[in-house]
Amino acid sequence: MILSLISQKGGVGKSTIARLLGVEMARAGWRVLIADLDANQGTVTQWKIARDREALDPDLDVIKYRSVERALKDAGRYDLTILDGPAHAERGGLTMARASSLVILPSGYSLDDLHPQAAVAGELERAGTPPVRIRVALGRVKGSETERRDVRDYLRRAGLEVFDAELREMPTIRQAHMAGRAASETTHQSINQEAAALAAEIAAALTASAEVA
Ligand SMILES: Nc1ncnc2c1ncn2[C@@H]1O[C@H](COP(=O)(O)OP(=O)(O)O)[C@@H](O)[C@H]1O
Ligand SMILES: [Mg+2]
């Protein structure tokens, strides 16, 4: 199975969800590859070095690629390949989406994040990606309950599906990342549970979508 994380903007939480889902699926026994397509940043590649240094389980593969095509060539060797896209995934984004059972568009509560992601969803749909294969994940969330409702209203009006679980913006998640851990492996049990809930929802959507395809 192949899953893509796509955005126009950087810093919306793509690599965070890649690490979270990768770790949780590996824990469930899947052979997982995270394809780090952000060759300039190499966020997940750096993270994997820290994870190996600490010899953390479960293990998963992280490989840096300069093109989506190259990543797709390796995908056959894994149960799940997570394409962790760069910012400005214009053309590459279409190739990523076409190969994927599920496309995730991460966002925070801010319209500055949401609006570009709604535009990306529109582009992908016009290029032939079925809307049911596109989901927003609120992955770097900070704000009030009112904001939360407004955001979900906005997404509903935009016709975009969104996962119920959200990941709050928390220092402990940043610290976990620096230590080679995922958002479900922090020192805060409640955060780990929220993160694992999001991963479980994504996994369910992925398997449902792959069965239809
Ligand atoms: N829920 C969160 N809580 C705290 N920090 C987060 C959270 N999500 C992302 N970050 C941090 O924000 C930065 C950008 O996130 P990242 O997932 O790398 O975004 P992208 O891959 O879209 O550029 C990283 O430093 C990451 O550790
Ligand atoms: Mg990234």
Image: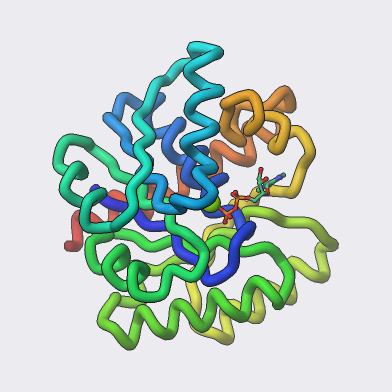
**Is 143 on the left or on the right of 141, as rendered?**
right
161 vs 81, nearest the viewer: 81
Relative horizontal placement of residue 106, taking residue 120 as reference (left or right): right
Identify whether 156 is placed above or below 15: below
- Measured from the top left, where is residue 109 in percent x and y? 72, 67
Q: Residue visible at 40% across and 84% down?
A: 123
Splitting the image into 4 quarters, where does residue 196 fall? top right
Quick one: 162 or 116, which is closer to the camera? 116
Residue 128 at x, y percent in the picture: 26, 81
Where in the figure is residue 68, as x and y percent of width and height? 28, 57
Residue at 43% in and 68% down: 89
Taking the spot 45% from the left edge, 31% from the top edge, the residue there is 23
Number of marks drawn: 0
- Give the image quarter of residue 127: bottom left
Drawn side of residue 16 relative to residue 82, left or right: right
Identify the image quadrant of the C terminus. bottom left
Residue sitting at the far top: 55
Q: Name the spot of residue 10 as percent of width and height, x first.
A: 60, 62
Instruction: Please name the residue shown 37% across and 42% down the image.
Output: 64
Question: Is residue 89 shown above or below 47?
Answer: below
The answer to which quarter of the image holds residue 28 is top left
Q: What colour scheme was applied to this rendering of the protein?
A: rainbow
Q: Is residue 146 left or right of residue 192?
A: right
